[in-house]
Amino acid sequence: MANNNSQKVLVGAGLAAVAAGAYFFLGPNGKKHQKKMKGWMVKMKGEVLERLEDAREMTEPVYNEIIDGVAQTYSVANKVPKSEIVALATDLKRHWKNIVGGRKTARKTTRTKKNSRSKK
């Protein structure tokens, strides 16, 4: 049973990661994000997604912690202005509510239309 529950958690974390990436690039501001992305931004975002997929549980604090960890790595290792790293990290953090909201709407069941013809 524990193995089954852990698999569900991992699948949920993976779905959250995919949803985050999809919303960032395909959401209402997706075209703007695609144009603004620089090479290091793509790499940083990819690392965030990888860590999200590896997370055992997905909550907002865990999500923010992952983003902060990757941002810290980039601010130390790369020659990227810290202000740009902070701006990207802040933008990624703002998407948490959209990710959670997207998961809730995906779970809703769709209503099927009943046949309006009556049997005679």
Image: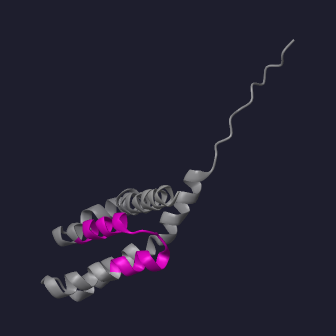
Q: Nearer the viewer, residue 39 or 107?
A: 107
Q: Is residue 73 visible in this depiction of the protein?
A: yes
What main secondary structure does the magenta stretch of the protein show? helix
Counting from the top left corner in percent of width and height, residue 45 is at: 28, 69
Q: Nearer the viewer, residue 25 or 6?
A: 6
Tell me what residue is drawn at x 53 percent, y 57 percent: 1
- What is the tally of numbered marks visible in this picture? 0
Instruction: Please say if 62 is above or below 11.
Output: below
On the picture, is 80 further left or further right than 99? left
- Image: magenta residue range: 44-67
Instruction: Please say if 82 is above or below 98.
Output: below
Counting from the top left corner in percent of width and height, residue 101 is at: 55, 63
Tell me, yes or no, whether the highlighted magenta stretch contains residue 64: yes
Counting from the top left corner in percent of width and height, residue 110 is at: 64, 42
On the picture, is 119 further left or further right than 22? right
Quadrant of the image occupied by residue 31: bottom left
Q: Is residue 37 visible in this depiction of the protein?
A: no
Tell me what residue is drawn at x 22 percent, y 83 percent: 73
Tell me what residue is drawn at x 51 percent, y 70 percent: 97
On the picture, is 103 further left or further right than 88? right
Counting from the top left corner in percent of width and height, residue 81 is at: 19, 86
Instruction: Please say if 17 is above or below 60.
Output: above
